[in-house]
Amino acid sequence: MASQQFDPPSGTRDFVAADLRQRERVFHAARTVFERYGFEPLQTPAFERLETLTGKYGDEGDKLIFKILKRGVHEGSGEADMALRYDQTVPLARVVAAHGSRLPTPYKRYVIGPVWRADRPGKGRFREFTQCDIDVVGSSSPLVEAEVVCAGADALDAMGVRDFAILVNSRKALTGLMQVHGVAADRAAGALITLDKLDKLPPAEVSAELVEARGLDRATAENLVNDVTADDAVQRMQAVLKDDPDGAEGLAEIDRLLELAGPHVGEDRLKFAPNLVRGLDYYTGAIWEVVAPGLPGSIASGGRYDHLIKAMGGPDVPACGFSIGVERIIGALGAVDEAADRIDVAVTVMSEAFVADAFGFAQALRGAGHTVEIFLGTTRKLGKQLKWAADRRARYALLQGDSEHAEGAVTIRDLETGDQERVSVGGLVTALDHKLRM
Amino acid sequence: MASQQFDPPSGTRDFVAADLRQRERVFHAARTVFERYGFEPLQTPAFERLETLTGKYGDEGDKLIFKILKRGVHEGSGEADMALRYDQTVPLARVVAAHGSRLPTPYKRYVIGPVWRADRPGKGRFREFTQCDIDVVGSSSPLVEAEVVCAGADALDAMGVRDFAILVNSRKALTGLMQVHGVAADRAAGALITLDKLDKLPPAEVSAELVEARGLDRATAENLVNDVTADDAVQRMQAVLKDDPDGAEGLAEIDRLLELAGPHVGEDRLKFAPNLVRGLDYYTGAIWEVVAPGLPGSIASGGRYDHLIKAMGGPDVPACGFSIGVERIIGALGAVDEAADRIDVAVTVMSEAFVADAFGFAQALRGAGHTVEIFLGTTRKLGKQLKWAADRRARYALLQGDSEHAEGAVTIRDLETGDQERVSVGGLVTALDHKLRM
């Protein structure tokens, strides 16, 4: 138990080299795609003023905000004035409000950075985790949805996620559906939250909840559920919504997105899914969720949210975004590839008299761009140093004993084959350049 | 005044694209060098348990720790249980204690990451700033000092810092000097703190403080100051220290570092500086500081600190490190190079009927790896769209009007020269590949 005092705080992680290489590979893949689409990086402080964050995430969210105590003479008050970033959207809203005139219009930004939530830690759930978001702020063009969906899909591809499908719906189509079925406007939001459970609960249970918790009559509840889950749900939606203004607009948004993005994402990977709801009520237009076989739930999601930036403290500008669950994806990528962690050359030190020479070899090879380590222990025994070289997963070891030293030479040992070659000190860099390029 | 509510919290910064590109260029330069030396990256959580941090930085440091309030039902207590990372050394000590057996021996780690201090914000002083550290934990070899100094110097070179000098001394040499001059052991640490002011105060004032604040007699104070500041200070130190065991060992450490690292860093850039003290009392061996013309104070520093990891909560292992003041260096690099921020192609949309075609051009060029933006505004006027393309610093604009569309062509406009070329849609990617490679 005593050793737990050295563990990182509950819900957080220490990332050592192999972890970081895997994470960086995934992040780099996403960044490369986002930059190609003209998204710009943004990095905001780890903490914001407390009042910037409170009231933006609902009562449950507010409880999960890490709050920072006032400092100095005010510490004793027990009051907080700062808080750790809870998501990437509120900071985006603040930046758009603060720097709007210096930013491009529309502002296309990506961010891959940590957020903190005082959630109960659990399997795959952390108190410090990375969010990967792209957002376009300031344009209502339907091209925005297409850009965002294509960039997100390309990023998932680049990260190595295979066989995913992007399910599309529209908040306006769902609003229209409520209207067509005569659900009162003040009950519609609640009904949608219940409909959103269709991916977890059987249709009958969802119908029952619509009746019991949301006050719909039984026939309406069953018709609603049937419309979005039937085998011919797409055709049903098109039929029932065509005369409702909101519904027709929603269907047109979906068609436009499928038309523009479908040819690039792949028609089979981008589908209208009438039963996709998304519980969050800030969406105003197209919405989508990405599912992949073998990965539970959704691995990414997004949509148009034209008033959220204002609600989050920014100006009233249209916006649309895509958020990728990178922690889930990294977790699914499985074991870290330690082979990628190899160093090129391990330099042994076989005598106190040759320390400076050995260091000179290391420096010359580093100067040529190779990854080189020199033995930093006290033993001069070759066997122990070769074990160290193997532990460090070096491809070659350099050895210089009395005999090599006397003739101005050094031995290169291939640590896979055990083959050795003696080369002149002057020819060392050329010889290893050649071997490492093979 | 009202707009200040959208500024980032006092002492923190929002980094937009151009800022991040400049910062990333500097960080990438350092990372590349550190990896070549076999240093491994480490990333620890932004916060640690409060007790991990308190008592490690002295009373003044403790006051500057950002403390995080307990959550949920404990929030009302006003008590903190977590705290933001204050430096990179305490987390390193914790990681060595927690994961020691899974880490290489010695453990060579680099870190380039943010720390938070509730300091009074001021010019060039931030509450959130990046520290760039390399450390070797677990070896007493003099090669460690040479590795660390060479890696630090190579990183400064790679970052673009010119004409720097690394000033070297040894804590043991300074201890020897105190002994030779008969300064009592319990006064030595205080006297060294005063001596450390020689880079800011004239020698006479330092002598006076040694007498008044540190209790030395006037002759001793003047001799001490004279020994380390005289034109022949190096020769004086060698003469006075050669018979003192600590002093002689300190001089030997300095000689060894100059011998091993000098040929690689450049003899003229690595110098024994008897008047270099460094106020921090955790150093146990060689110490150094890097100065560069035009940059006030030191831009990097380090040394051997064989008991700090234990004092910071880790095991009792020898260690040696180098910390680079990256914020100061980035600040000195001056204006951001916005030219590096260019995009390759801006795609205009000249008619509602051609939206899907235009998006197809953008996607095809992105697929070929180019950075492409498509116009997301509502106007279809070419002049406004060309102004947008220029604002985005695009190299080429794509235009497709009725005439191009009719013949299955698209016009490529060079935004620097105004030259235009009409190419077939099928030949677009090849044509732009060619132009962008020129």
Image (cartoon, coloured by chain):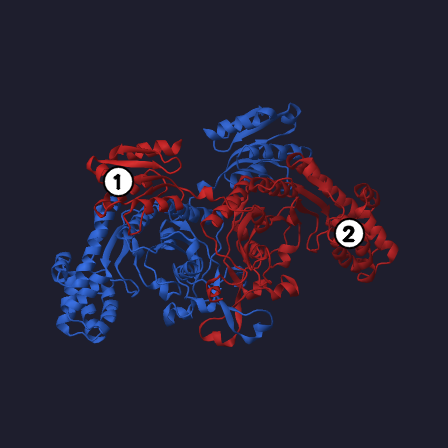
Chain colours: A blue, B red
Q: Which residue is mark 2?
A: B175
Q: Nearer the viewer, residue A209 or A144?
A: A144
Q: Are marks 2 and 1 in contact (CB under 8 Å)?
A: no
> Which chain letter matches label 1?
B
Image quarter in which the C terminus of chain B is found:
top left
* First in sequence: mark 2 vs mark 1: 2
Q: Position of residue A153 (x, y in %)?
A: 30, 48
* Mark 2, other Cα within 10 Å: few <14 / some 14–19 / many ≥20: many
B24 lies left or right of B224: left
Q: Position of residue A146 (x, y in %)?
A: 27, 50
Is residue B184 at least partly visible in the picture? no
Is residue B159 at least partly visible in the picture? yes
Residue appearing at x 63%, y 35% in the figure: A359
- The mark total stands at 2
> Which chain letter matches label 2?
B
**Amino acid on which disc 1 is placed:** Gln
* Mark 1, other Cα within 10 Å: few <14 / some 14–19 / many ≥20: many
**Amino acid on which disc 2 is placed:** Thr
Q: Position of residue A54 (x, y in %)?
A: 42, 69
From the viewer's perspective, is the residue at label 2 or at label 1 nearer? 1
Are the numbered discs 2 and 1 placed on the same chain, yes or no?
yes
B140 lies left or right of B344: right
Identify the element where label 2 is drawn: helix
Residue at far right of view: B219
A132 lies left or right of A429: left
Question: Quadrant location of residue B310?
Answer: bottom right
Asked if residue B167 is positioned above or below residue A51 in the image, the reply reads above
Question: Quadrant location of residue B146?
Answer: top right
Q: Which residue is mark 1?
A: B400
Residue appearing at x 70%, y 39% in the figure: B258
